[in-house]
Amino acid sequence: MTHDPTRSADPRLTAPAAVAPTSATPTSAAPASSAPTSSGPDRPGVAQADQPLTPEARRVVTLATLGFTLMFAVWVMFAIVGLPIRTELGLTDAQFTLLTAIPVLTGSLLRLPAGIWADRYGGRRVFLINMILTALFALALAWADSYGTLLVLALGVGLAGVSFAVGNAWIAQWTPVSRQGLALGTFGAGNAGASVTKLLAPVMITLVPAGLLIPGGWQFVPFVFGLSLLLCAALTARLAPADRVAPRSRTLADWLRPLAKAQVWRFGLYYVVFFGAYVAYSLFLPRYYVDHYGIPLAQAGLLTALFIFPASLLRPLGGYLSDRFGPRAVTVSSFAIMLVGLLPLMRELPVMPFMLLTTVVGVGMGVGKASTYTLVARWNPGQMGVVGGLVGLLGGLGGFFLPLLFTALKPALGAQTAFITLFALTALSGVVFVANMVRLNVLGSQPRLT
């Protein structure tokens, strides 16, 4: 991996002695701009001091990561509980796909307004409200008994996906720019909540029989998840420090102004590849293992977890590498890793090499998700909620539409449609990223990252 000249450790970016030290004001209070401000590590001529995280900031990162892990487990639980629901209600493939995708749609569309609210009113407050509302919908789901009711409640359960935009804004309000790659990557590792669902939900389904006072069968899963979210909300309310958001008089137009930048939408495209496809594969792979290889649901969940673990738990590593080498080099490397894994997956393989290659794809996704959000944080200080919300929205919409696209193209492309489609999308996104990087270098603007 090559050294990125835009990272803060580069001696060319050392601040001159006359530059005043960076203020201790939280990131959320920084002014919005189309490029990193003077306190950011990516503006030539000025660098931010390497500030350690305060105890309060560490607490925010820990609590946000715990809450996001549970929320993500809830967000993708239909990938597992949807299979017994499909059998119980006799759902078609289209009905099943819609049921699993509906929560992704809700959680994606609401990320932008939720991010704005977190920037404006404070991440702690919005994160708590988000957890409590999601818990109530999950508990109600435990008593659902018809497809129509399931669809309505799935919309509410989708609120779990909003937690990503809120948590990113919350953490950005408490962490210095020089530490945001690792902090945001650690928080993003909460994507491993999908593994919680894949590993525990099949066991929970068989643990409590139906017909008891406590909901049994597949309904036991949302019941337990709902109670867990309420407990986590109580813990967060007790331990999280009070929000520190500077008073602002911004209009709605001020909040939305960064969305006019083409750069922000390119970030969204990259995040469709790294995160949207991750969500799509988390929903798609259990059914693929069951239908294509005839593997039992519990084992299919375990094999899917082997993809989810690197795609989630490597986010802190991706954040650290982005802080160390620069997010641009890390992002290019992530595209390359995914393409290497996807190329052989475009033809049918035995289960063992298939599993190993999906793990490779997960490595690229995990690192790339962190590097993308490091780019977002460095270029949009003080507006992590709104810009991160839009990028998360676009990535989440990718998680909604990609499974539908896989189903639509399957008659033409066959069983490997999901891998052929993602290979093409990854290659396209990588070309866009590199082309913009080269264009800006030619224009003499190398410190610009995309």
Image (spheres, rainbow, N blue to C red):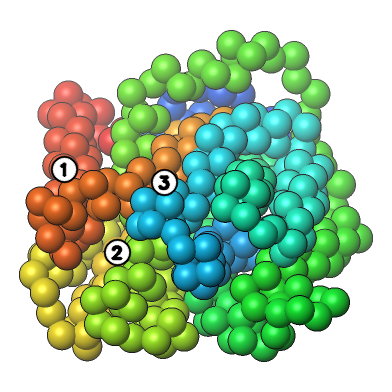
Q: Residue at x 33, y 23 (%)?
A: 262
Instruction: Tell me if 322 is positioned left or right of 250 in this view.
Output: left
> What element does badge 1 sit on?
helix
Q: Is residue 275 visible?
A: no
Look at mark 2 in the image and give the residue it sits on: 364
- Which picture quadrant has residue 442? top left
Look at mark 3 in the image and give the residue it sits on: 400
Which residue lies most toward the right here? Answer: 238
Contact between marks 1 and 2 (CB within 8 A): the answer is no
Q: Nearer the viewer, residue 188 or 288?
A: 288
- Which picture quadrant has residue 165? top right
Q: CA distance from mark 1 to mark 3?
A: 19 Å
Look at mark 1 in the image and give the residue it sits on: 428
Kindly report which numbered mark, 1 or 3, lies closer to the viewer in this rendering. 3
Q: Nearer the viewer, residue 126 or 436?
A: 126
Q: Nearer the viewer, residue 20 or 378?
A: 378
Placement of 301 over or under 166, stated as above or below: below
Q: CA distance from mark 3 to mark 2?
A: 20 Å
Placement of 94 over or under 117, stated as above or below: below
Q: Residue at x 75, y 14 (%)?
A: 249
Q: Residue at x 70, y 36 (%)?
A: 118
Amino acid marked by disc 2: Gly
Q: Is residue 254 visible?
A: yes
Which residue lies most toward the front here? Answer: 90
Residue 414 position in % (x across, y down): 12, 60
